[in-house]
Amino acid sequence: MYIDRAAECVGQVETIDGWVYNSRSSGKVAFVLVRDGSGIMQCVVAKNDVDESIFELVRHLTQESSISVSGTIHAEERAPAGYEMHVTSVRVHQVAVDYPITPKEHGVDFLMNNRHLWLRSKRQWAIMRIRATIVKSIRDYLDSSGFLLMDAPILSANACEGSSTLFSTDYFGVPAYLSQSGQLYNEATAMAFGKVYCFGPTFRAEKSKTRRHLTEFWMVEPEMAYCDWSQNCDVQEQFVAYIVRRVLEERKEELAIIERDTAPLEKIVPPFPRISYDEAVNLLQKAGSPIQWGEDFGGDEETTISGQFERPVFVHSYPKSFKAFYMKTNPENPQTVLCADLLAPEGYGEIIGGGQREDDYQLLLERLHAEGLSEKDYAWYLDLRKYGSVPHSGFGLGVERTVAWICKLPHVRETIPFPRLLEKIYP
RNA sequence: UCCCCGAUAGCUCAACGGUGGUAGCACUGGACUGUUAAUCCGGGGGUUGUAGGUUCGAAUCCUACUCGGGGAGCCA
């Protein structure tokens, strides 16, 4: 049996294949917490009920030894999860010696170096299961809302946005780069399939050393033909609200393990507030920030803005100067572009960047030249504006930042099984 | 890349110029029939990150380096 099916197995004799999570023993009774990946089961061995050799064996089981235990499943209030096994036999596969992660506190460096073992811990177990539900709800929402999965290439000949640093590799003698976004390709597939999304790993070789950055992270990027920036926001708020609701419904136990207060998550329902960059600058200045119009927001600014709202907040119409070349110029204020970032509450900041794309051939060409990008490299992208150009929009949601917010984690490094951080690629 | 901080037992830490800690966890021997990071008694466990320097004496002060943490910039 798997431990998460304990309720269905009460009164039955079952076998659990797992690992020793922790054990305690007194003179005549021993408690072994066994985990099998699906949960943790308290297994009880009473000296009088079993052969002496089994009792002695169990008493000396070490943390993370692999065992198969058999016995009867009982409902038991005193057991951690409400059920326990009264053990009749034990088979030891391997005795683990000196497992490094003890049931006391450890430092981040030590735990990261032992990430391959750290994932066995209860807290990491809960976070990874919430991550899996977030990923599943992302796919479920898009698949059932008319979006077609159209994955973008990981290897590419040129940068998507000139600004970020790219990881380079050798592609049969010519330079190639690891994708930092599938967006440009999404624009092509959206013109072929209407509503599309890509979902995969993304790479940024930035020397960023903060709680919000990984060099390899997962991003889902939907793109929609015949969609303006405002309709784009409509989709995003429904999408994010759906993800949060699914986690609340399906991961109660995991949220409890990580002691996440779910009250703020219950409030994540559409519509989300929408403020312009201008309004955001005003709001920041009133809050005492020295920011001037035309400057980009840093982590502190994002925290201040999102701290004013209980729901995620859209900040739209940023100045053109620090946004990517493909963003559509705002016809009402040509100094700005029709983009919108979504800032998560509780100080988490940007989880989505998106907006409307420039669909005018001439304007796009001018922006491309202004950024010093080669027209030849982007010939295929410009074709999309030559052959049936339409208003279209899309966005990219960072999975790890979303997991960090929903789990209220202090750092994104715990949101992915094996995080890739600045100069850290082991294990 | 820049600014702060740190490195002592396998892990988490104490000692802050005068002999490395009756320290906790882990491991190990013992006690205990309902434990919840169990508790209690005993045991083993150290080139104080590396290389120099100051000093009668350095884990402690100074310099450089290495590794790590927090933050900035950039971004999801």
Image (cartoon, rainbow, N blue to C red):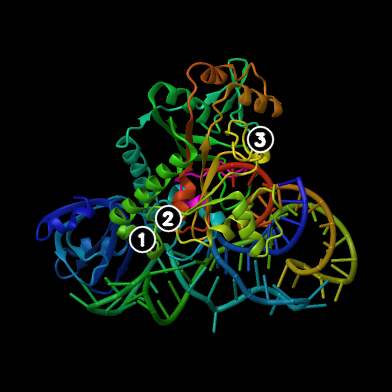
Q: Which mark is residue A83?
A: none
Task: From the image, tell me which residue sits under label 3.
Answer: A163
Q: Which of the two marks, 3 or 1, is nearer to us in this view?
A: 1
Q: Residue at x 28, y 53 (%)?
A: A250
Residue A352 position, x and y percent, is: 50, 45
Secondary structure category for the residue under label 1: helix
Q: Main secondary structure of the magenta part?
A: loop
Q: Amino acid at mark 1?
A: Glu
Q: Chain of mark 3?
A: A
Task: From the image, tell me which residue sits under label 2.
Answer: A406
Q: Amino acid at mark 3?
A: Ser
Mark found first going from the N terminus, 3 or 2: 3
Q: CA distance from mark 2 to mark 1?
A: 11 Å
Q: Which residues are magenta?
A: A412-426
Task: From the image, tell me which residue sits under label 1.
Answer: A266
Mark found first going from the N terminus, 3 or 1: 3
In this view, the residue farthest toward the left is A11
Secondary structure category for the residue under label 2: helix
Residue A122 position, x and y percent, is: 37, 58
